Amino acid sequence: MTDTEQAAAAREDTAAPAGPGVRGIREGLLWAGGLALLALSVAVAVTIGPARISVADVWSAVASHLGAGDSRLSPIRDGIIWNLRMPRTLLAAVCGAGLAVCGTVMQSLLRNPLADPFVLGVSSGASTGAVVVVVLGVGGGAVSLSAGAFIGALCSFALVMLLSHTLGGSTDRVVLSGVAAMQLFSALTSFVVMTAADAEQTRGVLFWLLGSLGGVGWGDVWICSAVLAVTLLICLGHARTLDAFAFGQDAAAALGVHVGRTRIVLLCTTALLTAALVSSAGAIGFVGLVLPHAARALTGSGHRRLLPVTALAGAVFLVWVDTLARTVLDPQEVPVGVVTALIGVPAFVLVLHRTRRSP
């Protein structure tokens, strides 16, 4: 165990005497505060836009559609809230939470602070699948853009797993295989767009590749939410295992962790969630890279606390980023991935600076 790892273990040990009761109260307050902030963020974000809508209007529309009362809104205003803004805002929350959770798991599993949900080439594969459907018309209209993106993401992940297994299956081989797959599918995407797409298709594909939550519906919300819930449960079930991985594979194996099986389960789980999110919203970068570091500053490195807090932080973050993206240049919309990069790069530099200064 290195000096850095021993120091981390010592910090964890010194935090233990606070007592289970105090820790439980802190966790409960953190959970309650995070959920309240998320609910308030969603309610306020839905009100922002060309049509004047209040928070009371949002609660009225939601209560009406959930059967808890009658809406006093006109059909047009009700449709703006329930059919346009609400699914988009909720999907932003789901995507933010999912990408942040995947980034947390990837960084711990691969012991790489620069790992993010797209390190396995899932984003590039999804982009290729989407372009093949939209530009080449593969599927004859029976396969949607989201379905094509999901299939492409799975193909890319399968290639990464095959390459990494062939090369020995270590964490560095997984990362290198992901980089190779990313470059391959990015090249395929560029080739198809340059040789077969017209100007309108190129513009639409580029906007989707940079991340877009426009035009999503309730179906996207339910599917992504279900995959997120399953992924979060699986990752929480492996929280202690992820804590053990922080000290290296050998240390994890010495603690009784089945390293190979655990890595495959968690990599497959996070890859499926990333594929589902990318197929609905495109490639949204920096959420899974920056948010886990910010959450660790609040909770420490214990994954039982870290994973839920990271999910809530990612959800709130992307709700407001999407709100900014669709309103800052109204009526023109900015791709969400552009805004996350503009915010994420300075934030990540700040995180690296604080990490360098910490003992």
Image: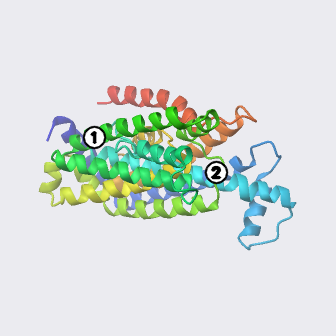
When the figure is inspected, residue 284 is found, relative to residue 227, above or below; the finding is: above
Q: Quadrant of the C terminus?
A: top left
Mark 2 or mark 1, whichever is nearer to me: 1
Along the line of sight, the residue nearer the viewer: 251 or 289: 289
Measured as percent of width and height from the top left, residue 300 is found at 36, 45
**At label 1, which amino acid type do we have?**
Val
What residue sits right under mark 2 in the picture? 89
Give the quarter of the image for residue 103.
Answer: top left
Instruction: Say which residue appears at 47% left-offset and 59% top-offset.
Output: 228
Left or right, residue 239 beside residue 153: left
Measured as percent of width and height from the top left, residue 52 is found at 83, 46
Cα separation between marks 2 and 1 = 32 Å
For the residue carrying disc 1, how many other residues have a C-alpha within 10 Å: few (<14), some (14-19), or many (20+)? some
**At label 2, which amino acid type do we have?**
Thr
Give the quarter of the image for residue 240.
Answer: bottom left
Q: Is residue 298 visible?
A: no
N-term-proximal mark, 2 vs 1: 2
For the residue carrying disc 2, how many other residues have a C-alpha within 10 Å: few (<14), some (14-19), or many (20+)? many
- Check residue 158 in the rendering and tell me which mark sits there, or answer none: none
Give the quarter of the image for residue 291.
Answer: top left
Indicate the secondary structure of the residue bearing disc 1: helix
Q: How is the image coloured?
A: rainbow
Instruction: Say which residue appears at 19% left-offset and 56% top-offset.
Output: 259
When the figure is inspected, residue 344 is found, relative to residue 260, above or below; the finding is: above
State yes or no: discs 2 and 1 in contact (Cβ < 8 Å): no
Q: Quadrant of the N terminus?
A: top left
What residue sits right under mark 1 in the picture? 175
